[in-house]
Amino acid sequence: MELALLRDAVAELKDQLIGKLWSKYQTWPMYSKFFDNQGALPLHIHHDDEHAARVNANGKPEAYYFPPQLNNHGGDFPYTFFGLQPGVTKEEVIEALRNFTKGDNRICDLSAAYHLTPGTGWFTPPGTLHAPGSLCTYEPQKASDVFAMYESVVHNQVLSEELLWKDTPPEEMGNHEYLLEVIDWELNTDPLFAQKHFMKPVPVLDLSVMRAEGYEEKWICYLSKDFSAKELTVLPGASVTIKDGGAYGLYVIQGHGTMGVWDIESPALIRYGQLTHDEYFVSEDAAKAGVTITNPSKSDPIVMLKHFGPDAHENMPFPLR
Ligand SMILES: [Zn+2]
């Protein structure tokens, strides 16, 4: 069997694979990964388009969803710091940034942590300070790697100063004011930050209507204009045809069955480098025509997480940011 990268498949098949997104992006403009850290990550930030452009990159919004199937324990720190406490001053933040090389700069003292709950998620726009916690996290995001680490010591590990200045343009190196400017001040100090960025799953249609047809589908990431994600559950014994408006990647995180001509199954154990039947990519044409998923189990649902690029849906539950 010959292996190929999704990137090469997109370059070869173009709009036949990703449909309307090809003419605008000439690439698949998002991706989703899992991160499964024992402890919290350092408080960091992703630049917005304007600051990212200064290092020839794109800005990066990201979102988190904590699948119950992958979270039978919370890890060492199932809390995420977001933003800054209202009342924190720019002087306090810049002092913490200047203290990066003087031991623990304790910048999280200026932030606020939220207890993470399996089966829910958060949206993190560019310019938001955040220190993701230790739940196993499904993370749809815009395809970009821009970031800078603003916390100097986390779980007794010292971060290199290079990470503080990562993705800073050469002419701003050493300028702590620039690091401060990357922080979207209004967003970070908004007292309603949690209410505006926490994401509880939202059923795509009336739940009883979907259950009668053998499935349940919920929006799990639905606030970003750059990407979105849904959780699809196909009930035991059911066969359903699900339509979507755009291409998507998917992971099967519970159960087994078929999707079109393909076998799908969530593996119990993956060894490094092994291929599995839990990850697929659906072309825009196939998504629009509808994908038939059949669950032969008498007891186990099929659960999959599906991540989309921009402009995939016309029925998003909230205005996009
Ligand atoms: Zn991040």
Image (cartoon, grey):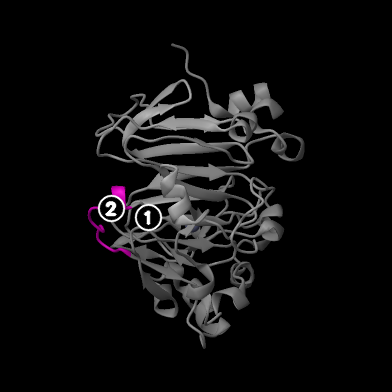
Relative height, residue 298 to residue 180 (above, below): above
In the figure, residue 287 lies in which quadrant? Answer: top right
- Residue in the picture at 51% in, 85% down: 86
Nearest the viewer among 221 and 32 is: 221
Relative height, residue 309 to residue 266 (above, below): below
Q: Residue 263, image x and y in percent?
A: 39, 23
Main SS, magenta region, reads loop
Q: Which residue type does callout 2 highlight?
A: Asn
Q: Label 1 belongs to which residue?
A: 66
CA neighbours of label 2 inside 10 A, class few (<14), some (14 to 19), many (20+)? some
Q: Quadrant of the N terminus?
A: top left
CA neighbours of label 1 inside 10 A, class few (<14), some (14 to 19), many (20+)? many
- Residue in the picture at 52% in, 68% down: 197
Please, what secondary structure does the residue beneath circle 1 have? loop
Q: Residue 78, image x and y in percent?
A: 30, 63
* Residue contact between numbered discs 1 and 2, judged by CB atoms under 8 Å: yes
Q: Which residue type does callout 1 highlight?
A: Phe
Residue 69, magenta (yes or no): yes
Query: Does residue 106 appear anywhere in the picture?
Result: no
Q: Which portion, as a residue range, is magenta? A: 68-78
Nearest the viewer among 43 and 4 is: 4
- Residue in the picture at 49% in, 42% down: 306
Tell me if 36 is positioned left or right of 192 in this view.
left
Q: Label 2 belongs to which residue?
A: 71
